[in-house]
Structures are given as C-alpha cells and as structure tokens.
C-alpha cells in the first residue's frame, strides 16, 4: 500500500478521534475511575508545584508528612509536569498529552499487526479497532499510568516480534528498553517479557539451535528487566494494604462473588468494553479461523499461547481486585484481542465475495458510533461519580482558605478526590468516621480547617468543641476553622 494512503488514513483517524474527544478536553476529572485519575493528576500537580524530583511522587492525603508515596515509576506524571513548567498548569494539557499517548499506542498496534500479518490492511484494521475499543476510547484522554505503560509495551512487543524475524540484537535492545519502561510504569506489563524466553525455547529445543547463540539476547533483556525489578523491590514494602500485591492470596470475597466477577468480565467487559459489540463477530470468527486452519501448528502460535496464558493467570490472580469495574487493569489483553479481531475481519475480506467485503467495511465503520454510544455518558458532569458540589464549587472551595493550610476533609472513601478538588493537603476520613479525639490529634499536628459534607460529623457535640468559626457553606460542603 502506498505511504500516501497510509498517511491519509492516520490523518483521518486522528481527526475523527480528536473530534469525538474535543468536547471533553476542558472538563475536569469525572466519572468512572475518577479515584485513580485524581490520584494520578495530584502526583502531576505536586511535581509541578512542590518537587520536580522524579523519585519523589507526592500525594495530598499526607496528614502532616511530606506526602511521598512511591508506587509505579511516575515517568508519565513527571513528563506532564515538565510540560506544565513550559506551558503552564492545565488539566487540558494533561488530556492533550494522554491523547498523544493514545495515538502512539495506535501507531504501535498498527506496526505490530502489520509486521505479524505482513499486511497494511491488517495494520489499518488493528489501528481502527483499538482506537474505537470503548475502554481505550474513554481512557485516551484521561490521566492514568496504564495508558502510558500500554503505549510503551505495544512498541516493546513490536520489537520482540521484529527480532523474531531478523534475530538482530538491535531489535532486542529496543524491545528491552520499551518493555523495561512499560514495566516500570505499570508492573503487570512485566508479563510481556515472557515472549522472549518462549521464542528462545522454541529455537533451542524444537529446532535444536545452540543456546549459546542467545547469550547476548539473555544478557540484554535480563539487564533491562532487572532495572524495573530494582524499583519495585525497593517500593513494594511501602504498599501497605494494597490488595494488588496479594491478589487472591488475600481474598475476602465469597466464591459466589468471585464467579460473578468472572462472568461479568466474560459476558460484559470483554465484548462490550474491550472488543466493542460491533467487532465481536470478527473476534469470534478469528477464534474459528485458528481451529479451522490449524494455526496452532505454527511455531509463533506457542508464543501467543504462553503470552496469553500468562496474562490470563494475572487476571485470575487479581480478579478480586479487578471485580466489575477496573477494566483498565485489562489493557494487557489488547494485543491478543486485536489479533483475533484482525484475523476474523481479514478472513472475510480475503473471500472472493463482494457482499462479505462490503459487510466488513460497514461493520468497521460502525465502531466509532458504538464506542460513542457506550462511552459518552462517562463525561457527564451532572453525574461525576462523587459529590457534585466539589466540581460545581471547585474554585470557591479552593479560595476559601490559603492553599498551604493543612485540612481535614471528608467524606471521601478514595482519599484523593476531595483533596484534589479543594487543592489542599492533610487528613481524609470516610463514612462519617471522624471522632473528636482524632480531630484533636490532627489539630495538634497542624490541621487548621475542616471541609466536610457530613452532617453527622458536624452534629457531634464533641466535634463542635473544636470548631472555631464557619468560613462558608457551598452546596452540601461546609468549611470550618478549627481551634
């Protein structure tokens, strides 16, 4: 296919995605997973406002401490903060950065699928299907490290399969760089590394190639992987109460609930959010083609199979945490999902039947429509997923007291949303759970103001003894000076 045609396709794809996202670029953070979005954006803001040291990501829920809390390596957050240093602080700039990251992912998926299918058409279908996967479409402009890690990982896996074709150490180096950064930015993408030893196993044991010929590959990939592991070995010990680490080993749900989560992800999340209902027929046909053409006999199929089983094992291990809502935890499935979609669509396009070819084109054209129908409600500012008064009265709440004030805020089960919207640091309580002795201790440690939407807390006579004067009340949120 001519480069000019590919360029036109990507210009049109970018323009369409930009047009569909454009009404939401200026909106503040709302809707599904606003908890994680505000946590990420808070880290960005604190890099910009307090400390630009990439090793010191800070959160607002810090009590009277420094707020440093290290989880994934905050490369994405740090880069956005760097843009703030140049262009100024703006949630719109964050969304623009995430949108560009999404385009980088789409281009990576195009390159990966074109490589393994040896077809520009396959790459185009892949880019289109990823762009309008409902989950990917929604998160494309939202601040999540998963987006950035996925973009890096898809380029990493592209270079892995390029190395499989060329066996050049240069491609292993690029693959290792991208996969190392992806793993640093989000630990589950460590699973992508399994493709390298799987291929070495195939060559060494199935084709009797001398293992010594892979020593340089092992040394390069192991060196970069170790860089990622060093970070996590140093920071995981500080992840108190983080269920991601323990997964099903620390499960508190009944097996009935776990089965319900599995069923929901299989019958709803997979077809509705990850694939897109319009693309489900291609996905099913792709599975059929694997069995009909006995693709498992291909050496590369073992790589896909082991890779897929590793991701599936991760999914099952984390199902109690993924539950029914954390679809962004499933980004690692995207390459394999897209492979099946492309396999099915291309199988129909390759048939000498104009009706089938026309049908494929029509169905692909429906993907942006069905993605929009499913996801446009997620940017609804009238139903932001938290106390709407935080969004409506954001500016007044921020200006009610000085930014440097240490505050007690609640209710907020997330421990991120409330402090993000009022732009303060301090203590967070949830479910009306604030006792007078706790508040007294907070005051002794520097707390000077109380922000709350809890009438039960304000009606507590012992709490009232610590309230000096009412600063303001905006909607359901009262602001009090503490004494």
Image: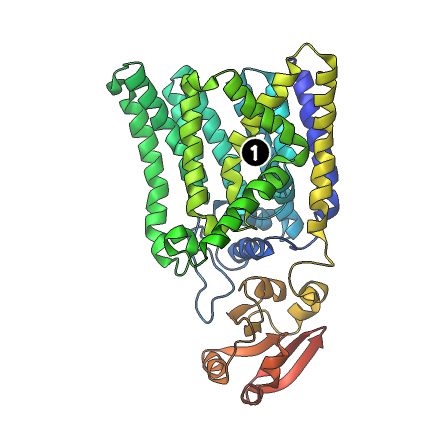
Q: Name the quadrant containing residue 64.
A: bottom left
Q: Compare residues 293 and 3 and report the one nearer the observer.
A: 293
Picture quarter with the N terminus:
top right
| Residue found 69% across the figure and 29% down from its top | 13
In the displayed structure image, the side of residue 4 where residue 251 appears, left or right: left
* Residue 358: % across, % down: 74, 19
Is the residue 371 above or below the residue 167 in the image?
below
Farthest top residue? 352
Residue shown at 54%/62% (left/top)? 414
- Judging depth in this view, the residue of 152 and 455 nearest the camera is 455
Q: Is residue 15 visible?
A: no
Quarter of the image with the C terminus is bottom right
Task: Indicate the colouring scheme.
Answer: rainbow
Expressed as whole percent of the image width and height from the top left, the position of residue 135 reads 61, 42
Relative side of 295 to 196, left or right:
right
**What crowding class fits label 1: few (fewer than 14 Cα within 10 Å), some (14-19), or many (20 or more)?**
many
Q: Quadrant of residue 298?
A: top left
**Percent from the top left, x then y, of residue 71?**
43, 52
Total residue callouts: 1
| Above or below for 441 versus 312 | below
The residue that mark 1 highlights is 105
The residue located at (44%, 26%) in the rendering is 304
Residue 376 position in % (x across, y down): 72, 46
| Residue 96 makes an appearance in the image | yes
Quarter holding residue 352: top right
Q: Secondary structure at mark 1?
A: helix
- Report the front residue among 371 and 236: 371
Tell me if residue 8 comes above or below residue 432 in the rendering. Answer: above
């Amino acid at each position: 296919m001519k480069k000019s045609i590919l360029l036109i396709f990507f210009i049109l794809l970018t323009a369409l995605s930009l047009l569909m996202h454009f009404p939401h670029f200026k909106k503040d953070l709302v809707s599904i997973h606003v908890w994680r979005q505000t946590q990420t954006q808070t880290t960005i803001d604190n890099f910009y406002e307090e400390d630009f040291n990439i090793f010191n990501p800070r959160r607002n829920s810090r009590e009277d401490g420094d707020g440093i809390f290290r989880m994934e390596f905050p490369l994405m957050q740090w880069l956005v903060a760097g843009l703030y240093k140049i262009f100024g602080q703006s949630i719109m700039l964050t969304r623009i950065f995430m949108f560009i990251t999404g385009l980088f992912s789409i281009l990576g998926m195009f390159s990966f699928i074109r490589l393994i299918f040896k077809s520009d058409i396959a790459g185009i279908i892949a880019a289109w299907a990823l762009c309008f996967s409902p989950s990917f479409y929604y998160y494309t402009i939202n601040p999540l490290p998963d987006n950035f890690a996925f973009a890096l990982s898809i380029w990493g896996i592209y270079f892995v399969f390029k190395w499989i074709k060329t066996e050049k150490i240069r491609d292993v180096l690029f693959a290792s760089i991208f996969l190392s950064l992806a793993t640093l930015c989000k630990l589950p993408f460590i699973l992508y590394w399994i493709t390298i030893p799987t291929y070495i196993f195939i060559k060494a044991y199935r084709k009797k190639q001398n293992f010594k010929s892979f020593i340089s590959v092992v040394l390069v990939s192991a060196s970069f992987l170790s860089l990622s592991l060093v970070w996590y070995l140093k920071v995981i010990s500080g992840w108190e109460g983080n269920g991601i680490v323990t997964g099903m080993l620390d499960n508190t749900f009944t097996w009935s609930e776990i089965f319900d989560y599995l069923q929901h992800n299989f019958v709803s999340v997979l077809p509705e959010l990850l694939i897109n209902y319009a693309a489900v027929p291609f996905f099913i046909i792709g599975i059929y083609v694997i069995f009909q053409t006995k693709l498992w006999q291909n050496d590369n199929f073992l790589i896909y199979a082991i890779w897929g089983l590793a991701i599936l094992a991760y999914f099952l291990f984390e199902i109690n945490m993924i539950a029914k809502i954390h679809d962004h935890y499933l980004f690692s499935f995207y390459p394999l999902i897209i492979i099946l979609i492309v396999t099915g669509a291309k199988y129909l396009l390759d048939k000498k039947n104009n009706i089938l070819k026309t049908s494929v084109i029509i169905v692909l054209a429906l993907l942006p429509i069905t993605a929009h129908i499913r996801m446009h409600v997620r940017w609804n500012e009238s139903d932001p997923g938290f106390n709407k008064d935080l969004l409506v009265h954001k500016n007044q709440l921020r200006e009610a007291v000085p930014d440097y004030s240490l505050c007690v805020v609640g209710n907020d089960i997330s421990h991120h949303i409330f402090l993000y919207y009022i732009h303060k640091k301090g203590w967070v309580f949830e479910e009306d759970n604030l006792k007078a002795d706790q508040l007294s201790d907070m005051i002794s440690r520097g707390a000077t103001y109380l922000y709350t939407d809890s009438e039960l807390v304000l009606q507590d006579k012992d709490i009232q003894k610590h309230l000096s004067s009412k600063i303001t009340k905006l909607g359901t949120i009262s602001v009090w000076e503490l004494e």
